[in-house]
Image (tube, rainbow, N blue to C red):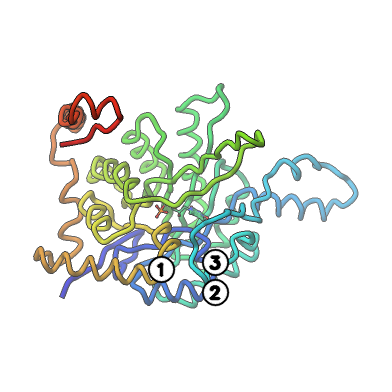
Amino acid sequence: MTDLRTTYLGCELKSPLVVSASPLSEEIDNLRKMEDAGAGAVVLHSLFEEQIIREDEELHRGLSAGTESFPESLTYLPEVTQYQQVPDFGVPNGTPDMTVYNRGPEGYLEHVRRAAEAVSIPVIASLNATSPGGWIKHAQKIEEAGASALELNIYFLPTDPALSGSDIEKNYCELVTQVKNTIHIPVAVKLGPYFSAMANFARELDKAGADALVLFNRFYQPDFDIENLEVVPTVALSTSQELLLRLHWVAILYGHVRPDLAITGGVHTAEDVLKAMMAGARVAMMTSALLRNGIEHLKRVRQGLVSWMEEHEYESVRQMQGSLALRSVPNPAAFERANYMRVLGSYRLRSLGSWRTGMASKE
Ligand SMILES: Cc1cc2nc3c(=O)[nH]c(=O)nc-3n(C[C@H](O)[C@H](O)[C@H](O)COP(=O)(O)O)c2cc1C
């Protein structure tokens, strides 16, 4: 019998298929479907730092009614309780209304409680944050509500030219340390790919106490509407092409940092999951694939995984984890550059004519 078990954030999971944070996890019924379809764990949609700060401020304002002490701080925060409506999202029927995305800090705690009761797989709560601060104490309540672990999605856009890369990295590490000092459950850190020295930064996050690194956040870049001169929010679902960046970094980091490695971004098929495992990930997370094809898609991916492993005589997922990682290479930097040169060198133009018409291709 093929053994799909893996360990992640201190839990043994029955499979490496994890559902990453999305509106799908807003419905308890969906969580049950995910478990039935073979998910090893599920990450809930995020609660945002701004929501907690806002609630604290409103509470404080209520207590000191009439003082009008901090009106501006209440208006600069984005309306994060209402998720941006996405025009054509490809969400199958029966998934939740995208315009009402989550329930605020108190509602979120109740959701964590109900989720933890509803399924027997680990429920990982998610906090979306940018900065250390008093709001972090809310993480304790999430722990008390029954989350098996917390995923900290640090989503910071460094638009201030005065802010250096090292300042930003310090800020991330301080945030992780504060959260770790506040709760006892494991903490995963979900990151974007835009750091100049990812391997070093991963080590710093390791020192700060991160129990897992979730690579990588996708950045939702707004588009321009050139007719109406407007900046418009867009959310496009991923394709398997996005997996490559994640494979690359997980293969590099595997064996060099203590935190578990998780891949999010571009996992759509059984083959993608196999690649993630071979790179060295403990789990492969999915959102776009389930939004596009429905939760049942997990079953197909699980079945594909088992079939491939049987055919290739793999007994367990653990056996393949890290088999394509770079740790056996003494000088990964040299390996990477050599590879880069080989790839560029392997590109062939079909003919001068096709080049002119833009139809060059790999041979
Ligand atoms: C509609 C939508 C909502 C999302 N909500 C969250 C969220 O609340 N918190 C979070 O950390 N990531 C969120 N994500 C990001 C996903 O968890 C995932 O990391 C990302 O989509 C990349 O994985 P994929 O290629 O499987 O979609 C969301 C993604 C989508 C498409």
| Residues at marks 1 and 3, CA–CA distance in whole angstroms | 16 Å
Q: Nearer the viewer, mark 1 or mark 3?
A: 3
Residue furthest out toward the top: 162
Q: Amino acid at mark 3?
A: Glu
Residue 332 screen position, x and y as percent: 19, 33
Residue occupying the point 34% across, 68% down:
298
Q: What residue does disc 2 label?
A: 114
Q: Position of residue 121 (x, y in %)?
A: 39, 72
Of residues 164 and 39, the one nearer the viewer is 39
The tag earlier along the polypeptide, 1 or 3, is: 3
Kindly report the distance in space between the C-alpha atoms of the residues bearing marks 2 and 3: 11 Å
Mark 2, residues whose alpha carbon is within 10 Å: few (<14), some, or many (≥20)? Answer: some
Tell me if mark 1 has few (under 14), some (14-19) or many (20+) residues whose alpha carbon lies within 10 angstroms of its own: many
When the figure is inspected, residue 352 is found, relative to residue 107, above or below; the finding is above
| Residue that appears at 26% across and 41% down | 248
Q: Which quadrant would the C terminus be assigned to in this image?
A: top left
Q: Earlier in the sequence, mark 2 or mark 1?
A: 2
Pointer 2 or 3: first along the chain: 3
On screen, residue 19 versus residue 87, left or right, reads left
Disc 1: which residue: 122
Which image quadrant is residue 11 in? bottom left
Residue kind at label 2, given as amino acid type? Arg
Give the structural element (helix, strand or loop) at label 2: helix
According to the picture, the residue beneath numbered tag 3 turns out to be 26
Q: Position of residue 188 (x, y in %)?
A: 41, 52
Residue 145 in view of the camera: no
